[in-house]
């Protein structure tokens, strides 16, 4: 029986062996099967949509690498996001941090830094150098804003409730808080010259009190004037040579007089005293005459030159403190006016403790050259009545707005004028320069005004001509230059810490 089969190539019915239709050898089954498999495999690769078995391995490897790359990208995105958040956080809070650090620095460097509010609102030169515009006037370095007066029973209710009770000490000059204007000691009433000579001078490595012309005058020939907070000029200006009726700073106005002679002297102190390393250079003037005894006057002038040195050392010595201090003192002096009846010497004092301002002030000593006596500064002008109010009004026009005299009662200001240790009284070619060295809150400083014609307030307790200065007229000058006090302008005017 013949057996028929289908040809795997052409599909025809043929007998086993060779296909009668296409000639395909039916006995070559292996190659035929392989060929069929190859065709089927090709078909599967092109059209098959199910899971691939033999070719799944390469695709699996590609998926694995993609997952790793995706993970790395995700980690990178997270890191970039964190960095951006950190940058935004720093940008938002860095100014606050800087301000906090700045405030802390202010506490260190400005605790003893005085305020000088005598800066003219109308571009008038005053007795004060320019202020430092980089100092923030709104910062009080000694007030702790975090203290709550309602929960802290240690705060004195009569004192500013924001004052830190840990530094409030009414007996301490360093951290003294004045609720109203008070006098700043700048005179000589506390000086014991014998104690100075017997107990302070012996500890000096170098001490001398000699004519300045015999030594190098560091104020006139050197650079010590740059360390003074209140300017002194040794360049003489003619009596009628001032450009404005305002006294700008301490200026040499000495004219040789046939009735007396004036000698400039210098005191040098360098040494260590009970842990204090002291370096002081102070000048003053001594008068001499064949007809008048100036002994008392010369003692007063000398004492004024060393008063700050004695005051500081007396407080610091014998304290049994392990802390050491470097104390530097500069006191310069100049004759601000003289004639046949009077002579006026102005002193500018600045002291440093460990390179920080410790104190500074201006003071004047006036001498009646007819009898050699020192004039009582508090008896030259009448500070009673409305003088304090007059002074504040003049200061507001001539100087910048001074909180100490504007926020204190007139009667409190008047009391400071009657304190000889705080009063500033100087005869000048422009008339009288009068003012006070003061404390107010945690600050201290000084303020003066120029009075060309002081006859209205002259006490007449001393007999001398008061006509000098009448050639200048502040009121006419202010009228011609449209200078006046604008109380509304001061609401926007900033008050700065005094600094050169």
Image: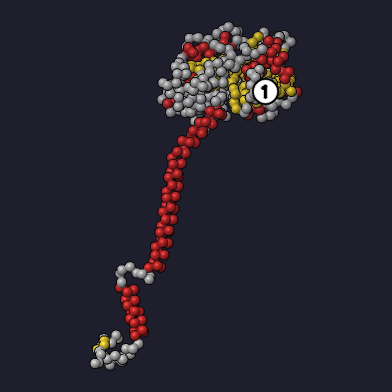
Residue 235 found in image quarter: top right
> Taking the image as drawn, is residue 314 in sight?
yes
230 and 463: which is toward the camera: 230
Q: Position of residue 496 (x, y in %)?
A: 50, 27
Secondary structure found at label 1:
loop
Q: Residue at x 37, y 68 (%)?
A: 56
* Lateral position of residue 51 relative to residue 296, left or right: left
Taking the spot 56% from the left edge, 7% from the top edge, the residue there is 460
Q: Residue 24 lies in what quarter of the image?
A: bottom left
In the rendered image, the vertical position of residue 4 relative to residue 284, given as above or below = below
Image quadrant in which the C terminus is located: top right
Instruction: Establish if 85 lies above or below 204.
Output: below
Q: Residue sitting at 51 percent across and 25 percent down?
A: 142
Few, some or many residues within 10 Å of mark 1 (<14, 14–19, 20+)? some
Q: Residue at x 46, y 19 (%)?
A: 155
| Residue 439 screen position, x and y as percent | 53, 18
Which residue in the structure is indicated by mark 1? Answer: 275
Please give left or right for residue 32 compared with residue 142 in the image: left
Q: Residue furthest top?
A: 461
Specify the quadrant that holds the N terminus. Answer: bottom left
């Amino acid at each position: 029986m013949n057996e028929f089969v289908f040809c795997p190539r052409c599909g025809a019915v043929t007998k086993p062996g060779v296909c009668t239709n296409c000639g395909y050898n039916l006995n070559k089954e292996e190659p035929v099967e392989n060929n069929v498999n190859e065709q089927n495999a090709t078909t599967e690769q092109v059209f098959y949509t199910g899971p691939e078995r033999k070719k799944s391995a390469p695709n699996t490897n590609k998926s694995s690498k993609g997952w790793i790359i995706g993970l790395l990208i995700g980690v990178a995105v997270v890191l970039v996001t964190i960095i951006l958040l950190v940058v935004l956080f720093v940008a938002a809070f860095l100014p606050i941090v800087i301000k906090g650090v700045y405030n802390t620095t202010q506490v260190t460097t400005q605790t003893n830094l005085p305020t000088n509010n005598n800066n003219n609102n109308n571009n008038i030169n005053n007795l004060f150098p320019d202020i430092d515009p980089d100092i923030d006037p709104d910062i009080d370095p000694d007030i702790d804003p975090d203290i709550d007066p309602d929960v802290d029973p240690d705060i004195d209710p009569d004192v500013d409730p924001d004052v830190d009770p840990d530094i409030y000490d009414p007996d301490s000059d360093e951290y003294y808080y004045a609720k109203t204007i008070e006098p700043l000691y700048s005179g000589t009433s506390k000086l014991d010259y014998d104690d100075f000579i017997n107990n302070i001078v012996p500890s000096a490595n170098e001490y001398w009190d000699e004519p300045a012309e015999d030594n190098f005058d560091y104020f006139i020939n050197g650079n010590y004037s740059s360390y003074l907070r209140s300017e002194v000029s040794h360049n003489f200006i003619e009596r009628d040579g001032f450009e404005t009726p305002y006294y700008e700073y301490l200026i040499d106005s000495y004219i040789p007089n046939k009735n007396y002679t004036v000698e400039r002297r210098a005191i040098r102190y360098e040494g260590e005293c009970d842990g204090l390393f002291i370096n002081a250079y102070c000048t003053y003037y001594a008068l001499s005459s064949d007809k008048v005894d100036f002994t008392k006057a010369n003692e007063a002038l000398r004492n004024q030159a060393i008063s700050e040195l004695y005051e500081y050392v007396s407080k610091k010595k014998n304290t049994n403190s392990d802390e050491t201090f470097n104390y530097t003192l500069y006191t310069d002096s100049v004759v601000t006016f003289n004639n046949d009846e009077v002579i006026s010497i102005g002193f500018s004092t600045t002291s440093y403790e460990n390179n920080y301002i410790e104190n500074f002030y201006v003071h004047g000593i006036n001498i009646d050259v007819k009898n050699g006596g020192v004039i009582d500064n508090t008896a030259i002008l009448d500070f009673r009545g409305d003088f304090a109010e007059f002074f504040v009004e003049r200061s507001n026009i001539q100087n910048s707005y001074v909180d100490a005299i504007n926020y204190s009662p007139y009667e409190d200001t008047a009391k400071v004028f009657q304190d000889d240790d705080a009063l500033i009284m100087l005869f000048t070619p422009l008339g009288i320069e009068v003012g006070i060295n003061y404390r107010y809150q945690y600050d201290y400083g000084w303020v003066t005004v120029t009075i060309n014609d002081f006859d209205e307030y002259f006490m007449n307790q001393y007999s001398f001509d008061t006509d000098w200065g009448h050639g200048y007229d502040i009121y006419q000058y202010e009228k011609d230059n449209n200078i006046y006090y604008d109380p509304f302008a001061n609401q926007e005017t900033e008050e700065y810490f005094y600094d050169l």
